[in-house]
Image (tube, rainbow, N blue to C red):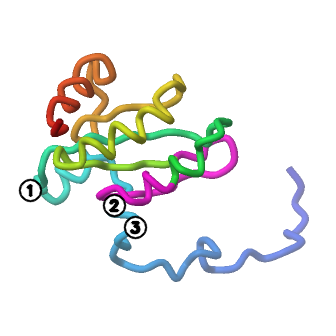
Protein backbone atom coordinates (compact mmCIF):
# COMPACT_ATOMS: atom_id res chain seq x y z
CA UNK A 1 0.00 0.00 0.00
CA UNK A 2 1.21 3.44 -0.83
CA UNK A 3 0.51 6.66 0.95
CA UNK A 4 0.06 8.52 -2.35
CA UNK A 5 -3.29 10.22 -2.82
CA UNK A 6 -5.66 8.48 -5.28
CA UNK A 7 -5.31 9.49 -8.92
CA UNK A 8 -9.05 9.90 -9.40
CA UNK A 9 -11.98 10.59 -7.21
CA UNK A 10 -14.98 8.31 -7.68
CA UNK A 11 -18.35 9.84 -8.30
CA UNK A 12 -20.74 9.99 -5.40
CA UNK A 13 -23.41 7.96 -7.12
CA UNK A 14 -23.28 4.22 -6.69
CA UNK A 15 -23.79 2.98 -10.28
CA UNK A 16 -24.43 4.61 -13.61
CA UNK A 17 -27.94 3.11 -13.30
CA UNK A 18 -29.06 5.41 -10.51
CA UNK A 19 -32.30 6.37 -12.23
CA UNK A 20 -34.03 3.01 -11.83
CA UNK A 21 -37.80 3.08 -11.37
CA UNK A 22 -39.17 2.31 -7.93
CA UNK A 23 -41.70 -0.24 -9.23
CA UNK A 24 -40.93 -3.20 -11.53
CA UNK A 25 -42.13 -2.98 -15.11
CA UNK A 26 -44.75 -5.31 -16.58
CA UNK A 27 -42.01 -7.24 -18.45
CA UNK A 28 -40.05 -7.74 -15.23
CA UNK A 29 -43.14 -9.00 -13.43
CA UNK A 30 -43.96 -11.37 -16.30
CA UNK A 31 -40.47 -12.87 -16.21
CA UNK A 32 -40.58 -13.67 -12.48
CA UNK A 33 -40.39 -17.27 -11.42
CA UNK A 34 -43.97 -18.47 -10.70
CA UNK A 35 -43.11 -19.45 -7.11
CA UNK A 36 -41.54 -16.05 -6.41
CA UNK A 37 -44.49 -14.23 -7.98
CA UNK A 38 -46.90 -16.23 -5.83
CA UNK A 39 -44.88 -15.48 -2.68
CA UNK A 40 -44.74 -11.74 -3.42
CA UNK A 41 -48.17 -11.05 -4.85
CA UNK A 42 -50.34 -14.05 -4.04
CA UNK A 43 -51.75 -16.65 -6.37
CA UNK A 44 -52.87 -15.52 -9.81
CA UNK A 45 -56.17 -16.94 -10.98
CA UNK A 46 -55.39 -18.47 -14.34
CA UNK A 47 -56.61 -21.53 -16.25
CA UNK A 48 -54.54 -24.66 -16.67
CA UNK A 49 -51.71 -24.11 -19.14
CA UNK A 50 -48.95 -25.98 -20.91
CA UNK A 51 -45.87 -24.05 -21.97
CA UNK A 52 -43.27 -25.04 -24.54
CA UNK A 53 -39.81 -23.49 -24.12
CA UNK A 54 -37.46 -24.09 -27.03
CA UNK A 55 -34.23 -22.69 -28.53
CA UNK A 56 -33.72 -21.76 -32.18
CA UNK A 57 -33.66 -25.04 -34.09
CA UNK A 58 -32.12 -25.96 -37.40
CA UNK A 59 -35.24 -27.51 -38.92
CA UNK A 60 -36.93 -26.48 -42.18
CA UNK A 61 -40.28 -25.72 -40.49
CA UNK A 62 -38.85 -23.45 -37.78
CA UNK A 63 -40.37 -20.27 -39.28
CA UNK A 64 -43.79 -21.95 -39.13
CA UNK A 65 -43.06 -22.98 -35.54
CA UNK A 66 -42.37 -19.36 -34.60
CA UNK A 67 -45.64 -18.29 -36.24
CA UNK A 68 -47.51 -20.92 -34.21
CA UNK A 69 -45.74 -19.83 -31.03
CA UNK A 70 -46.55 -16.16 -31.64
CA UNK A 71 -50.23 -17.13 -32.06
CA UNK A 72 -50.29 -18.80 -28.62
CA UNK A 73 -52.02 -17.37 -25.55
CA UNK A 74 -48.71 -15.86 -24.38
CA UNK A 75 -45.42 -15.63 -26.27
CA UNK A 76 -42.08 -14.40 -24.94
CA UNK A 77 -38.55 -14.36 -26.27
CA UNK A 78 -35.82 -14.38 -23.62
CA UNK A 79 -32.05 -14.39 -23.62
CA UNK A 80 -29.65 -13.86 -26.49
CA UNK A 81 -27.04 -15.83 -28.37
CA UNK A 82 -26.81 -19.44 -27.23
CA UNK A 83 -29.22 -18.69 -24.33
CA UNK A 84 -32.02 -17.53 -26.65
CA UNK A 85 -35.32 -19.25 -25.83
CA UNK A 86 -38.85 -18.92 -27.14
CA UNK A 87 -41.67 -19.49 -24.66
CA UNK A 88 -45.23 -20.23 -25.83
CA UNK A 89 -48.10 -20.79 -23.38
CA UNK A 90 -51.23 -22.64 -24.45
CA UNK A 91 -54.55 -23.11 -22.64
CA UNK A 92 -56.28 -26.49 -22.77
CA UNK A 93 -58.69 -25.09 -25.37
CA UNK A 94 -55.72 -24.65 -27.76
CA UNK A 95 -54.74 -28.33 -27.78
CA UNK A 96 -54.51 -28.59 -31.57
CA UNK A 97 -52.19 -25.56 -31.82
CA UNK A 98 -50.04 -26.98 -29.04
CA UNK A 99 -49.81 -30.33 -30.86
CA UNK A 100 -48.88 -28.63 -34.15
CA UNK A 101 -46.06 -26.69 -32.49
CA UNK A 102 -44.84 -29.71 -30.50
CA UNK A 103 -44.62 -31.81 -33.68
CA UNK A 104 -42.06 -29.31 -35.00
CA UNK A 105 -40.00 -28.47 -31.88
CA UNK A 106 -40.62 -31.58 -29.77
CA UNK A 107 -37.94 -33.67 -31.45
CA UNK A 108 -35.25 -31.53 -29.84
CA UNK A 109 -34.07 -32.57 -26.39
CA UNK A 110 -33.61 -28.89 -25.57
CA UNK A 111 -37.38 -28.31 -25.74
CA UNK A 112 -38.95 -28.09 -22.30
CA UNK A 113 -42.59 -28.83 -21.48
CA UNK A 114 -43.89 -26.94 -18.45
CA UNK A 115 -47.22 -27.67 -16.78
CA UNK A 116 -48.57 -24.49 -15.14
CA UNK A 117 -45.06 -22.99 -15.47
CA UNK A 118 -43.39 -25.84 -13.63
CA UNK A 119 -41.33 -28.77 -14.90
CA UNK A 120 -43.10 -31.97 -13.87
CA UNK A 121 -42.13 -35.60 -14.38
CA UNK A 122 -43.37 -37.22 -17.57
CA UNK A 123 -44.65 -33.97 -19.07
CA UNK A 124 -43.78 -35.15 -22.60
CA UNK A 125 -44.75 -38.78 -22.13
CA UNK A 126 -47.96 -38.41 -20.10
CA UNK A 127 -49.33 -34.87 -19.93
CA UNK A 128 -49.12 -34.00 -23.61
CA UNK A 129 -50.84 -37.22 -24.82
CA UNK A 130 -53.60 -36.57 -22.28
CA UNK A 131 -54.09 -33.10 -23.74
CA UNK A 132 -54.29 -34.60 -27.24
CA UNK A 133 -57.54 -36.26 -26.11
CA UNK A 134 -59.06 -32.77 -25.94
CA UNK A 135 -58.67 -32.34 -29.72
CA UNK A 136 -62.04 -32.89 -31.39
CA UNK A 137 -62.08 -35.54 -34.09
Between the C-alphas of marks 2 and 1, the distance is 14 Å
Disc 3 to disc 1: CB gap under 8 Å: no
Disc 2 to disc 3: CB gap under 8 Å: yes
Query: Where's residue 21, x and y in %?
Result: 42, 80
Residue at position x 62%, y 37% in the image = 57
Between the C-alphas of marks 3 and 1, the distance is 19 Å
Report the side of 92 relative to 105 (left or right).
left
The stretch drawn in magenta includes residue 69: yes
Quadrant position of residue 95: top left
Magenta residues, as a range?
67-85
Which residue appears farthest toward the front when viewing the image? 137
The number of discs equals 3
Residue at the spot of label 3: 27
Residue at the spot of label 2: 30
Above or below, comparing residue 111 to residue 76 in the picture: above
Between the C-alphas of marks 2 and 3, the distance is 5 Å
Report the side of 107 relative to 120 (left or right).
right
Report the side of 130 relative to 64 (left or right).
left
Quadrant position of residue 51: top left
Q: Which badge, 3 or 1, is on the more N-terminal residue?
A: 3
Residue at position x 63%, y 80% in the image = 12
Query: Where's residue 85, x and y in %?
Result: 53, 45
Residue at the spot of label 1: 45
Q: Secondary structure at mark 3?
A: helix
Which quadrant does the C terminus fall into?
top left
10 Å crowding of disc 2: few (<14), some (14-19), many (20+):
few
Report the side of 104 relative to 40 (left or right).
right
Q: Secondary structure at mark 1?
A: loop
Name the foreground residue: 81 vs 96. 96
Residue at position x 26%, y 40% in the image = 50
Amino acid sequence: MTSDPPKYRPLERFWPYAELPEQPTDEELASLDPDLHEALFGERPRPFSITLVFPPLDVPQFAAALDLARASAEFRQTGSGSALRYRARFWSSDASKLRDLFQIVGASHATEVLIDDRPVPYARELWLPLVWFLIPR
